[in-house]
Amino acid sequence: MSANDVNIEDIMAEIRTEIKEKGYTSDMLSFKDVVSVSQTETEIFDKRKFTELMAYLNTAYRVPVARPITGNPLVVFVKKVIRKFTLFILGPVVDHQSEYNAFSARAFNMVSCYINENSTTLSESEMCRKIEILELKLQTASKEIERLSQKISELEKK
């Protein structure tokens, strides 16, 4: 069977037959229900992991123009010659990539500073303490409202 012999209608008929045999219906799984790789990579913010990634980003943004060449002396010589001939093309590209990486690292550093400045995360014990204080204030306010309501009632009677 060559590429010209492929009949799409026959293939679609086979697929439709298989769908009927297996009892699939349109309300079952669709392509939009399938979790894609990009959806599974979504993560919840983890400050420790973010700090680790920032440390790596701040040290690894520079792309080296060339790596050490090792091995057979003849192969090393040929690779060095090729490197000399291509360096004028690759050098600026690598420099631009490193510059872009550096700007990205700076931007992420600014995001990190913003997160640290605006972080109001409280520990569980601090939250419990604040809740207790608010509950006490609520009780006090409720008692005051009740006392004032009684006073109003007494004044209305007079």
Image: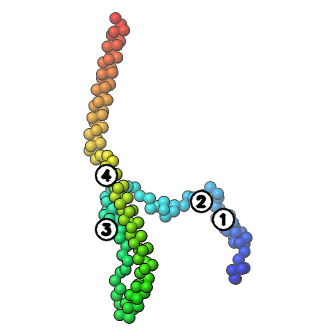
State yes or no: discs 2 and 4 in contact (Cβ < 8 Å): no
Question: As shown in the figure, which amino acid type bears the numbered disc 4?
Answer: Asn
Q: Which residue is mark 3?
A: 59
**What separation in Å lies between label 2 and label 4 (alpha carbons)?**
42 Å
State yes or no: discs 4 and 3 in contact (Cβ < 8 Å): no
Labels 2 and 3: the sequence-earlier one? 2
Disc 3 element: helix
x 36%, y 9%: residue: 156
x 62%, y 55%: residue: 27
Nearer to us of marks 1 and 4 is 4
Disc number at residue 142?
Answer: none
Residue 109 falls in which quadrant of the image? bottom left
Question: As shown in the figure, which amino acid type bears the numbered disc 3?
Answer: Thr
**What separation in Å lies between label 2 and label 3 (alpha carbons)?**
44 Å
**What separation in Å lies between label 1 and label 4 (alpha carbons)?**
54 Å
Q: Which residue is mark 4?
A: 116
**What separation in Å lies between label 1 and label 3 (alpha carbons)?**
54 Å
